[in-house]
Image (cartoon, rainbow, N blue to C red):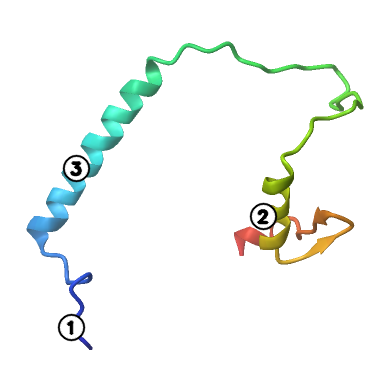
């Protein structure tokens, strides 16, 4: 295999340092998440269906990027097989 400066076999010491750093990062992040105060926005209407409305305006540049990156688009909508991402 060609020598690559970006990849090398991780030693046990490096592996342990990665574990410690990862745990520290996750603990710090979760502590910051606990400080966030927000009202839960759950709405139950009894039928399980939402009321139809005008919807919201989508940023056209974002929409264009999403549709260009989608593997299959039909009638300006992304077509995907249910659960296909799990395979």
- At which x and y percent is residue 29? 33, 29
Identify the residue position indicated by label 1 in the image. Answer: 3
Quadrant in the rendering for residue 33? top left
Select label 2 or label 1 by which is in front: 2
- At which x and y percent is residue 10? 16, 65
* Mark drawn on residue 65: 2
Which SS class for mark 2?
helix
In which quadrant of the rendered image does the C terminus lie? bottom right
Select label 3 or label 1 by which is in front: 1
Crowdedness of circle 2 by 10 Å Cα count: few (<14), some, many (20+)? few
Q: Nearer the viewer, residue 47 or 36?
A: 36
Considering every residue shown, the one lying at the far front of the view is 61
* Mark drawn on residue 21: 3
In which quadrant of the rendered image does the N terminus lie? bottom left
- Please determine whether, in this image, residue 55 is positioned above or below residue 8: above
Which SS class for mark 3?
helix
At x 66%, y 61%, the residue is: 69
- At which x and y percent is residue 50? 86, 25
Tag 3 and tag 2, C-beta contact below 8 Å: no
At x 19%, y 42%, the residue is: 21
Crowdedness of circle 1 by 10 Å Cα count: few (<14), some, many (20+)? few
At x 89%, y 57%, the residue is: 75
Select label 3 or label 2 by which is in front: 2
């Amino acid at each position: 295999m060609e020598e690559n400066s970006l990849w090398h076999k991780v030693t046990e010491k490096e592996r342990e340092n990665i574990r410690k750093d990862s745990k520290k990062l996750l603990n710090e992040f979760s502590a910051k998440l606990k400080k966030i105060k927000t009202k839960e926005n759950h709405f139950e209407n009894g039928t399980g269906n939402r009321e139809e409305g005008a919807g919201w305006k989508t940023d056209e540049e974002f929409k264009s990027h999403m549709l260009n990156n989608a593997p299959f688009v039909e009638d300006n909508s992304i077509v995907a097989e249910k659960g296909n991402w799990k395979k």
